[in-house]
């Protein structure tokens, strides 16, 4: 996988499932650069204790968004893990491995079919 920016920077740029807007419309053409991604992978970090890695991907499996969370941040409703997110296209990396791309596409499509983006999973 190649990321357009560091994973930690990508993890900070997210909008959860809200429209991600601060109420202003800075877009000249009215089009959003936000992309819907779906949870495809949840793993523990290998190098660091108490770190959960969440990977979201587009339904075609070609782009991904990674988040890292401390295990302790999973308590309470404010830190729910949503089935789908809208993220800036700048916060997406590309998936170059065909096996991973196919796995992400299968899982993202399954999540999209079974869940609303705002569902907690």
Image (spheres, grey):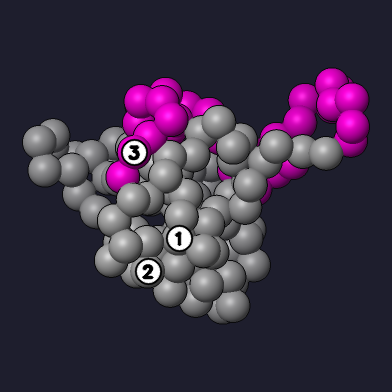
Percent of width and height locating residue 38? 51, 59
Residue closer to the observer: 2 or 64: 2
Say which quarter of the image contains residue 53.
top left
Q: Residue at x 43, y 74 (%)?
A: 106
Please say if 36 is above or below 66.
Answer: below
Label 2, label 1: how far apart the Cα atoms are: 6 Å
Q: Which mark is residue 21?
A: none
Percent of width and height locating residue 88? 61, 35
Q: Which mark is residue 2?
A: 3
Dots 3, 2 in contact, CB < 8 A = no
Dots 2, 1 in contact, CB < 8 A = yes
Please say if 77 is above or below 28.
Answer: below
* Mark 2 surroundings: few (<14), some (14-19) or many (≥20) residues within 10 A: some
Q: Residue at x 28, y 66 (%)?
A: 99
Quarter of the picture holding the N terminus: top left
Q: Residue at x 51, y 64 (%)?
A: 60
Q: Main secondary structure of the magenta part?
A: loop
Residue 106 showing in the rendered view: yes
Q: Which mark is residue 61?
A: 1
Residues shaded magenta: 1-30
Q: Residue at x 42, y 44 (%)?
A: 94
Please say if 97 is above or below 69.
Answer: below
Residue 81 showing in the rendered view: no
* Mark 1 surroundings: few (<14), some (14-19) or many (≥20) residues within 10 A: many
Dot 2 corresponds to which residue? 102
Q: Secondary structure at mark 2?
A: helix
């Amino acid at each position: 996988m190649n990321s357009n920016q560091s994973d930690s920077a990508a993890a900070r740029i997210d909008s959860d499932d809200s429209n991600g807007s601060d109420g202003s419309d800075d877009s000249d053409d009215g089009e959003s650069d936000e992309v819907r991604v779906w949870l495809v992978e949840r793993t523990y970090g290998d190098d660091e204790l108490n770190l959960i890695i969440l990977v979201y991907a587009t339904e075609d499996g070609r782009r991904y968004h990674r988040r890292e969370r401390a295990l302790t941040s999973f308590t309470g409703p404010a830190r729910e893990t949503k089935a789908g997110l809208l993220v800036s296209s700048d916060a997406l990396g590309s998936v170059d491995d065909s096996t991973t791309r196919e796995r992400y596409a299968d899982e993202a499509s399954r999540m999209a079919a079974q869940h609303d983006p705002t569902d907690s999973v």
